[in-house]
Image (cartoon, rainbow, N blue to C red):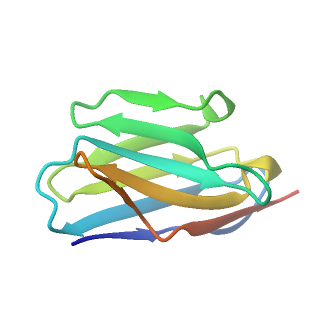
Amino acid sequence: QVQLVESGGGLVQAGGSLRLSCAASGSIFSINYMGWYRQAPGKQRELVAGITSGGTTNYADSVKGRFTISRDNAKKTVYLQMNSLKPEDTAVYFCNVRSPSWHWGQGTQVTVSS
């Protein structure tokens, strides 16, 4: 069984920063891809950023230049540094790990006030 523990969400003013973390544990030995998705009320879940085991990253256009994804393979942890936050970034953020089976975290709320 795989567990993903997320942390770092919260309430921040527009222009502020937050850093999300997601640590994987349990029966997971090889992680191919780690990423972050988000889901705002009434909207579909969307990919925010992802990173492969080799360090290749991809970002949604809406967060390019503001968010940075990174990972620590030894710790099986993925991070999302979010800068210059906007109210439209408000959502529940979910960690996603592929090994290659897909695993999801429980979600962490990010709220950006204007």
- Which residue: 41% across, 53% down? 96
Q: Position of residue 109 (x, y in %)?
A: 63, 68
Residue 73 higher or lower than 6, as above or below: above
Q: Position of residue 65 (x, y in %)?
A: 60, 29
Residue 112 higher or lower than 35, as above or below: below
Does residue 50 appear left or right of residue 30 in this picture?
right
In the image, farthest residue toward the front: 101
In this rendered view, identify the residue nearer to me: 22 or 105.
105
In this rendered view, identify the residue nearer to me: 61 or 80.
61
Q: Quadrant of residue 69?
A: top left
Residue 60 higher or lower than 112, as above or below: above
Does residue 78 appear left or right of residue 14 in this picture?
left
- Which residue: 36% across, 43% down? 70
- Which residue: 71% across, 48% down? 85
Q: Position of residue 30 (x, y in %)?
A: 13, 49
In this rendered view, identify the residue nearer to me: 84 or 42.
42
Q: Position of residue 101 (x, y in %)?
A: 27, 51
In the image, farthest residue toward the left: 29
Give the number of callouts: 0
State the quadrant of the C terminus: bottom right
State the quadrant of the N terminus: bottom left
In this rendered view, identify the residue nearer to me: 7 or 44.
44
